[in-house]
Structures are given as structure tokens and as C-alpha cells.
Image (spheres, rainbow, N blue to C red):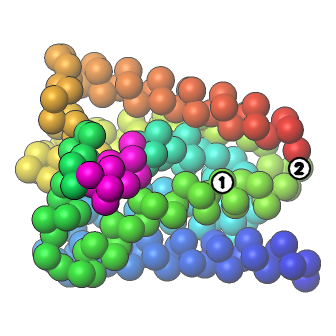
Amino acid sequence: MKKQDIIIKILGIFLIIFGLIAMIYGVLRGEPILILWVCYIGMIIIGLGCLLKNRQLILSQLNILTIPLILWDIDFISFLITKQTFFGLTDYFFEETLIIARAISLEHLFLIPLGILAFYLTKDKKSEIKNAWKISIVELTLLFIILRIVNISDKNINCAFYSCIPYINPEPYVLWWFVISFLGVFLTNFIYMKIKSFY
């Protein structure tokens, strides 16, 4: 087995285990709704993409997660430096008293770099990636519908009920949620497809 194959398998197993731990922790806290966080789902799907050497699965999750996690990371670094956040996305992290919860939230820092590494290492030519954005759109739509049906708005999972950025809350919110989410997917997919052409 090639060294690259070993790395991608280890990466896949790590992401799947971490994602499952995050979900199980949410259930043990008495908040099973937390398993619907797109970060946890995305982590597991990227892990599966690594094990299956399927770039389309990996890209479909990067399309969804890249922009939101970059904003989270900016907020996190901003607080470390200035004790203030730009967007209010990480306020909960520094208010959280449970160390385990904080440790799980640190996945926001490494998920995109590891996802990009997985996308680079997984060069299976049989794996079509031009339709990855379709998986992203279907996944986001299904998650939004499920969250609305369950209707536990106080957790605001995936910002499905109101903006996660306090000072930005456009109306009608449902319409803007889809517009912003889908534009993010299309933009991110375009960028990754362009990057792919360089190697």
C-alpha cells in the first residue's frame, strides 16, 4: 500500500470517529438535535470520501463548510488577539464551561485544512466531481426542511431559524437562507474546481 493511501485512510478514520464522538456527545447531553449540525455530518462524509477515495463526496462537503468555517476561524482568532469577535460566531465557545464541548468545537479549526488535504490526496479519476454541488444543494435543503419540521429553534442549528451573525438578519429569512447558502456553494465549488486544474 502506498504511503499516500495510508495517510488518506488514517485521515478518513480520524474524521469519522471525531464526527461520531461529536454526535454521541450531543445525544448524551440530552440534545440529540445537535447531530444535525452540518459540521458533524460533513466531517463524517468527508471521512467516508477518504475511505472510498471519492472526491465528489469530499468536495460536496467542502462546498458547504468552507465559507462558514473560515468566518468561524476569523472570529476565533480575533477573540484570541483582541478579546472581541467580528461576527459573534464563537462567543459560545468562550462562554462554554465544559472542556469536552470546547474540544469538540475545535473541529472548526482543522476540518477545512484536512478536507482540502483529503481532496488533494484522493485523485481517483473514476470519481466524477462536476456534480458535487448538486449533492451540496440537496443536503442543505433536506437539513433545512428537517430542522423546520422538528422546530427546535432555540439551538438554531445551521442558522436555520435566524442569522448566526447577530447584526445581520435579512427578511424574509427563509428566502435569504437559501440564497446565501446556495451562492456560497456555487462560489466555493467554482474555486475548488479552478484549484483542481492546477494539479
Question: Where is residue 139 shown, x and y percent of the image?
Answer: 45, 43
Q: Is residue 79 magenta?
A: yes
Q: Amino acid at mark 2?
A: Lys
SS state under label 1: helix
Residue 89 is inside the magenta segment: no
| Image-quadrant location for residue 124 | bottom right
Residue 199: % across, % down = 88, 44
User: Would you say residue 194 is visible in this rendering?
Assistant: yes
Alpha carbon separation for disc pair 2 and 1: 17 Å
- Residue at which label 2 appears: 125
Query: Looking at the image, which residue is at 32% across and 56% down?
Result: 81
Residue 3 drawn above or below residue 71: below
Q: Amino acid at mark 1?
A: Ile
Q: Which numbered disc, 2 or 1, marks the residue that appears first in the sequence?
A: 1
Left or right: 161, with 101 as reference point: left
The answer to whether residue 157 is seen in the rendering is no
Q: Is residue 7 left or right of residue 23?
A: right
In the rendered view, tell whether residue 158 sits above or below residue 11: above
Q: Name the quadrant containing residue 97.
A: bottom left
Instruction: Tell me where residue 7 appears, x and y as whole percent.
Output: 75, 76
Viewer-side residue, 144 vs 171: 171
Quadrant where the N terminus is found in the figure: bottom right
Which residue lies under the disc numbered 1? 116
Q: Nearer the viewer, mark 2 or mark 1?
A: 1
Is 21 on the left or on the right of 52, as rendered? left
Vertical position of residue 109 compared to residue 21: above or below: above
Residue at left offset 65%, top offset 74%: 11
Q: Which residues are magenta?
A: 71-82
